[in-house]
Image (tube, rainbow, N blue to C red):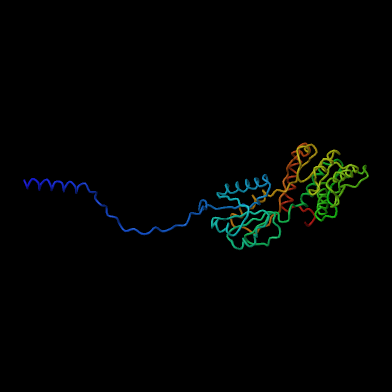
Amino acid sequence: MRTRLAAILLLFILLASCAQPTATPVGPTSAPVPTAAPTVTGTPGIPLVILVLPADMPRDESGQYQTAVYDLAQANGMRYQLLNTLTTADITLAGPDLKIVIVLPPDPGLAALAAEAPSVQFLAVSIPGLAAAPNISTIGAEGAPVDQQAFMAGYIAAMIADDYRIGMIGIRDDAKSDLAETAFRNGIRFYCGLCQKAFWTGYDYPVFNNIPTDTPLTQYPAYAIYLEQTAVSVAYVYPAVATPDLLFSLTDKDMLLIGEKMPSPDFQANWVVSLKPELFPAIQRIFPDLLAGRGGQTLGVPLTLTDVNTDLLSEGKLRLVQQTLDDLQAGYIGTGVNP
């Protein structure tokens, strides 16, 4: 009996021991090491271009710059970032992938920023007064090329005007307008030499009528009257005075117009062509050099032919105008003035 009880007790002990879980040995552990919060830096190793535009830039203009620079970045296998301001911290955060920074006014202190980041190429667009530096290039620091615009306006006017009855409206006692007047004369002469003028009118062409600087805008249309009295058939309107009211007054007098920008499609019948300063072609032209590290360049603002009236400028005439403009901007032709 005792033997049976002992056997039963032994059986219970064995069953109890089988029910207990087997412990798994655990190795030594160390305290967790705190890590900094991750910083979003984009895809590492891909070159970066930053475009700096003021927050108050008109939406259409801002969109054009963004599209142009984004397309350049994509075409060159680069990343693109838009900022409204630029600081040393922005450049530091971008790191070594940052290759090009394109900046429009106001100047965020490019001279100092460029000195702190010599491996980055900076392009200043329409920012005057920057000192030369190996990694700073400029476009349009001197503003629009009024001499080239006026020269081409004179050239085109001479090409299409009846009896060379040509006129210009500018600003009185204004240095740039005076310069444009001289370049306008030279453009006419470049096309036709002395030109056989319309002596039957009794006036010596080209005719100039300059508006005093203190004239209210509402009085600008009155200055179209003199061009009508002198039988002008084609007029160049200096950009600073080209108000819609003045332009309408000129077209009402059946004149053909050349200017910087056609205000609306309503002018199409009398508008010959626009000689428009365009920064985008200059940015596209210099971009490969900047990517290759060739900085320190100074470019003017190129002119483009837009709003072309094909009824007034045939294909052959337009081709001749474009070739003359190309040669002018390449330096093969001079305007005869020193801007």
- Could you tell me if residue 287 is visible in this image? no
Relative image position of residue 207 (x, y in whole percent): 87, 47
Horizontal side of 261 relative to 204 (left or right) equals left
| Residue 140 image offset from top left, x and y in percent | 70, 54
Q: How many marks?
A: 0
For the C terminus, give its image quadrant. bottom right
**Percent position of residue 235, x then y:** 83, 44
Q: Could you tell me which residue is drawn at 72 percent across and 51 percent down?
A: 329
User: Does 237 appear above or below 123?
Assistant: above
Quadrant holding the N terminus:
top left
Q: Is residue 7 visible?
A: yes
Q: Quadrant of residue 198?
A: top right
From the viewer's side, name the closer residue of 1 and 310. 1
Residue 92, quarter of the rendered image: bottom right
Tell me residue 192's x, y (percent).
Answer: 83, 46
Q: In this view of the protein, which residue sits in the foreground, 77 or 93?
A: 93
Q: Residue at x 48, y 54 (%)?
A: 38
315 up-or-down from 14: above or below: above
